[in-house]
């Protein structure tokens, strides 16, 4: 798991110009791989570094919360600890952040230390009550 898993080609092929919301699904490690607290603590360190990078590219954190239960569908493989909805003005802004040296060297190590699994799903708006900007 790491920046090398980023599907840049797939993101660049999205037939979409304009804002995107990235749905982040996270499963935390019991202990951070670097031994500095829990996986949650490593994720907090990651977030503290990443949120300013998101904002610098015109994005914003829309919503975060704990995943409590699978309400519909198979529970197998669908237990997540936490999720976040992150707005970016363009797919290019997301790619720019994720492929930056700053992200790879400073942020991603905390994410890897804290997350046993982290899935990001790129979405474009069909309907929203959220208005950004």
Image (cartoon, helix red, strand yellow):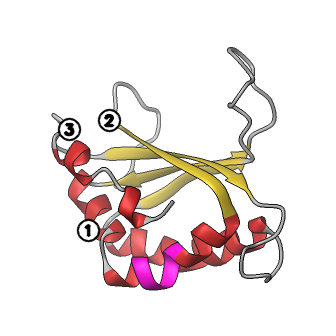
Regarding mark 3 in the picture, which secondary structure is present there?
A: loop
Q: Is residue 17 left or right of residue 121?
A: left
Task: Please provide the residue range marked out in magenta.
Answer: 104-108
Question: Which one is in front, 21 or 32?
Answer: 32
* Residue on which disc 2 sits: 124
Answer above or below: position of 27 versus 46: above
- Residue 90 in view of the camera: no
Circle 2: element type: loop
Q: Could you tell me how far apart the alpha carbons at marks 3 and 2 are, in whole angstroms? A: 9 Å
Give the mark, 3 or 1, whose residue is nearer the N terminus: 3
Identified at 75% across, 20% down, the residue is: 71
Local packing at callout 2 (Cα closer than 10 Å; few below 14, some 14-19, many 20+) is some
State yes or no: discs 3 and 2 in contact (Cβ < 8 Å): yes
* Front disc: 3 or 2: 3
Q: Is residue 107 magenta?
A: yes
Q: Earlier in the sequence, mark 3 or mark 2?
A: 3
Up/down of 115 relative to 37, above or below: above
Between the residue at mark 3 and the residue at mark 1, the CA separation in whole angstroms equals 16 Å
Q: Is residue 15 visible?
A: yes
Q: Position of residue 78 (x, y in %)?
A: 68, 31
Q: Which mark is residue 53?
A: none
Q: Does the magenta run of residues contain 79?
A: no
Q: Residue furthest top?
A: 73
Q: Main secondary structure of the magenta part?
A: helix
Residue at horizontal 35%, vertical 67%?
98
Residue sitting at 46 percent across and 40 percent down? 130
Where the C terminus falls, by quadrant? bottom left
Residue 14 numbered mark, or none:
3
Toward which corner of the image does residue 6 lie, by quadrant? Answer: bottom left
Q: Which residue is mark 1?
A: 96
Q: Quadrant of residue 77?
A: top right
Q: Is residue 28 left or right of residue 106?
A: right
């Amino acid at each position: 798991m790491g920046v090398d898993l980023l599907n840049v080609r797939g993101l660049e092929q999205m037939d979409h110009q304009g804002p995107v919301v990235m749905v982040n699904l996270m499963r935390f490690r019991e202990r951070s791989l670097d031994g500095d607290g829990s996986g949650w603590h490593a994720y907090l360190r990651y977030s503290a570094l990443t949120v300013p990078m998101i904002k610098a590219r015109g994005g914003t954190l829309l919503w975060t919360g704990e995943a409590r239960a699978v309400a519909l569908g198979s529970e197998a493989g669908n237990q997540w600890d936490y999720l976040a909805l992150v707005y970016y003005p363009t797919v290019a802004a997301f790619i720019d952040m994720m492929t930056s040296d700053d992200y790879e060297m400073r942020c991603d190590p905390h994410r890897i230390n804290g997350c046993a699994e982290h899935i990001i799903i790129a979405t474009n708006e069909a309907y929203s009550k959220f208005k950004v900007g």
